[in-house]
Image (cartoon, grey):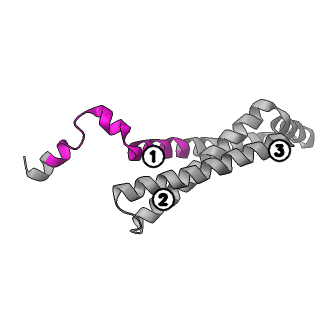
Amino acid sequence: MSSVEMAQSLRFLHRRQMWDATGMWAWVLHRVTGLGLVFYILLHIILMGASLLSGRDGFNAALNLLMTHFAFELLDTLLLGAVLYHGLNGIRILLFDMGVGVSVEAQRNMFRALMGAGFLIWIWSIASKFSG
């Protein structure tokens, strides 16, 4: 075993250390939100297409349900959170690919700053949505 391979194998002595890493959770959440957004787009296309095929009254009834039911309002806020996370983490990955902040500490700080900004935007959006 070469010294490089040994150093890589000793990087995480325990599986728990690997899952404590910020980068691992950023990767997992990026994949989960990406799959969720793809699922949402497909569901949205199917639902809107089916309601359009049922005529004007069917479309208006479906839209009325989606815009007024609390469960769909809650899902809408979760969708916004997923879009914010996926988009801001994508910007961080893009900056990394361009060579900006390539150290682990810079990536961790950039991740925390972007997620903090995204969280504040999400909370502000929720407050403005449910206040009026």
Q: Secondary structure at mark 1?
A: helix
Task: Please provide percent x and percent y for residue 76.
Answer: 72, 41
Pointer 1 with pointer 2, Cβ within 8 A: yes
* Residue 120 drawn at (x, y percent): 65, 49
Question: Type of residue at label 3?
Answer: Leu
Q: Quadrant of residue 123?
A: top right
Q: Which residue is mark 3?
A: 52
Along the viewing direction, whichever of 30 and 59 lies nearer the viewer: 30
* Disc marking residue 26: 1
Relative placement, left or right, of 118 versus 5 is right
Where is residue 69? Give x, y as percent.
82, 32
Q: Nearer the viewer, mark 2 or mark 3?
A: 2
* Mark 2 closeness class: few <14, some 14–19, many ≥20 residues within 10 Å: some
Work out whether residue 38 or residue 33 is closer to the camera in this orientation and state it: 33
Say few, some or many: other residues with alpha carbon within 10 Å of mark 1 (under 14 / 14 to 19 / 20 or more).
some
CA gap, disc 3 and disc 1 = 38 Å
- Asked if residue 89 is positioned above or below residue 79 in the image, the reply reads below
Q: Which residues are magenta?
A: 7-34
Circle 2 sits on which residue? 92
User: Which residue: 49% across, 51% down?
Assistant: 112
Quick check: can you spot residue 14?
Answer: yes
Q: Position of residue 95 (x, y in %)?
A: 46, 65
